[in-house]
Image (cartoon, helix red, strand yellow):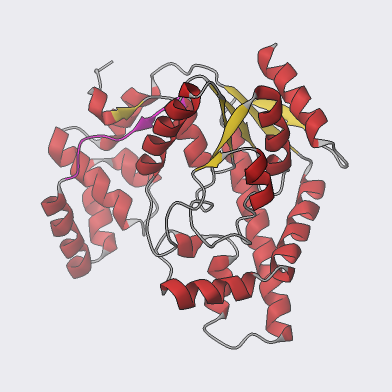
Amino acid sequence: MVSLPDSWIRPPLRDGWFLTGPTASGKTSIGLGLAELLDAEILSMDSMAIYRGMDIGTAKPTPEQRSIIPHHLIDIIHPTEDFSLSQYVDLAHRISEDIRARGKQVLIVGGTPLYLKALTRGLFLGPPADWEFRREVEEDAAKWGLDALRQRLEHVDPVAAHKILPGDLRRMTRALEVAKITGKPLSHWQTQFERIPIVPPKAAVLQWNRADLHARVNQRVEQMFQRGLIEETKHLLQRHGPFGRTASQALGYREVLLALQDEIHPETLTKLIEEVKAHTRQFVRRQEIWFRSMPELVRIPMTEPFDPHQVAARIVEHLIS
């Protein structure tokens, strides 16, 4: 196996506890109970909770909950700003070191699969960016179209071309960039990284049967609109202007932003709520596919009703046995 330069890799986050699960699975309440048992501080693993003001649609821990257990990586940037996976991983490592220096355990709670995989298995960054090359590729894509760019990638790295969605300019550009800089395709380097042995983390995933989880999703979405998701989105637009590329894709906000381009009346509101429910259920299915691809996660079966402290105790028992 070819050795990867240290600067190309972010190692896994060791000595942390992980609690994950799909949207609406009960992570927040169970995480609080788990943090109390472990004498831990919570590090959020939610790619949308990082945005200030996006409170209702992300179901952030309440101020009261955060006053009981310190939470980190929540409300760190405005919705107009973008935030990368590598930025998140770097901050997570730095904050975890600070937490441990205070004599506390680190508990990572959230349901963003890419964040979970990067923290438990490490992150392949590859060589530094070549901004001039990226500019040239973007100009070529604008001139000749994405199909021509995809054909170019198929010639350079057919494996990456097969994996990358046809419209994903950013990832196609990165694959071409890595091949140019290193003389080897991106898929080659990713294969080297994936051969690094996986050290099982102390990580639990909450598992529900589909019908119960979908019922919880539907209930959460209805509560989001009752609590004022539309008004919150309007306020953020008035205060900060258009959402950035990442924040604008957040479930709930994405649909509301589109709906606000026209007038929202009772009939369209009902349709909007059902649309958010459907998209959230689809997202839950994608989360579950990710979790199934990670056999190192300890499965915690869930049913209604549940006591968060009892589930937390069960998680600790499973993870230390």
The residue sitting at 48% across, 40% down in the picture is 114
Looking at the rendering, the stretch of residues picked out in magenta corresponds to 121-129
* Pick the front one: 270 or 52: 52
Q: How many marks?
A: 0
Vertical arrangement, residue 7 with respect to residue 174, above or below: above
Quarter location, residue 143: bottom left
Q: Position of residue 191 (x, y in %)?
A: 34, 27
Quarter holding the C terminus is: top right
- Locate residue 138 relative to residue 97 in the image: left or right: left
The residue sitting at 60% across, 56% down in the picture is 58
Vertical arrangement, residue 265 with respect to residue 209, above or below: below
Q: Is residue 201 magenta?
A: no
Quarter location, residue 79: bottom left
Vertical arrangement, residue 74 with respect to residue 264, above or below: above
* Pick the front one: 206 or 238: 238
* Pick the front one: 144 or 261: 261
